[in-house]
Image (tube, rainbow, N blue to C red):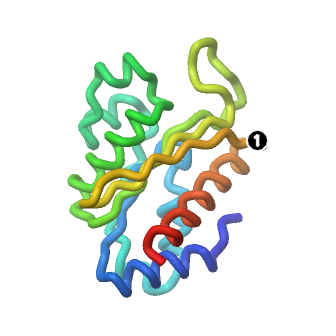
Amino acid sequence: MVSREKCRRVISMLRQKHLTLGSVESITGGLFASSIVSIPGASDVFRGSLVTYAADLKEKFTHVPHTMITRYGVVSQPVANEMAMGGRKALGVDVCVSFTGNAGPTHEPGLAPVGRVNMTISTKCGLVELSADFNGLRNEIQEKAVEMMLDYLSAIFG
């Protein structure tokens, strides 16, 4: 379960800085957004989320170039970066986070291994790239990715 206290802390920090937040999620399937909006007052900072599980939706809604997906795969740092930048623009937010990864159960040859998650934080100042290889079941990998993102947001905006 994602820490409600970490969510509260991020919301409070962003509220104090008058910053808005959005997310573009693939591997997490909306878990980040759901965790944030479970906190009363989240609407002070959180504007919305795009769940772009399919590659064509990443292209359509966050303008990830098809050639980038073909070259690097959907589970890659370049794609996570484009998702966050495109999401920041599409959602009209100050801060946008993105998640793409492989929660398993299978590893396809030549593609990202099970547990690989690429994440990005996009702000007007630039990008913070995050990558991790988590162990566990699908829901555990998803929760660990959201927790890691919350930790980084707290460190950056705290």
Determine crowd level at label 1: few under 14, some 14-19, many 20+ residues with C-alpha closer than 10 A.
Answer: few
User: Residue 52 location in percent, x, y?
Assistant: 40, 42
Q: Quadrant of the N terminus?
A: bottom right
> Which one is in front, 11 or 59?
11
Which residue: 49% across, 75% down? 10
- Left or right of residue 22, residue 34 in this image: right
Which residue: 58% across, 13% down? 110
Q: How many marks?
A: 1
The residue singled out by tag 1 in the image is 135
> Which one is in front, 38 or 2?
2
- Identify the residue at the far top of this view: 109
Q: Amino acid at mark 1?
A: Asn
Above or below, comparing residue 112 to residue 139 in the picture: above
One can see residue 151 in this view: yes
Task: Determine the image quadrant of residue 73.
Answer: top left
One can see residue 49 in this view: no
User: Residue 76 location in percent, x, y?
Assistant: 47, 31
User: Residue 82 location in percent, x, y?
Assistant: 32, 40
Which residue: 37% across, 84% down? 15
Which residue: 47% across, 63% down? 33
Above or below, comparing residue 18 to residue 63 in the picture: below
**Helix, strand or loop status at disc 1:** loop
Task: Determine the image quadrant of residue 80.
Answer: top left
- Left or right of residue 60, residue 43 in this image: right
User: Residue 39 location in percent, x, y?
Assistant: 53, 80
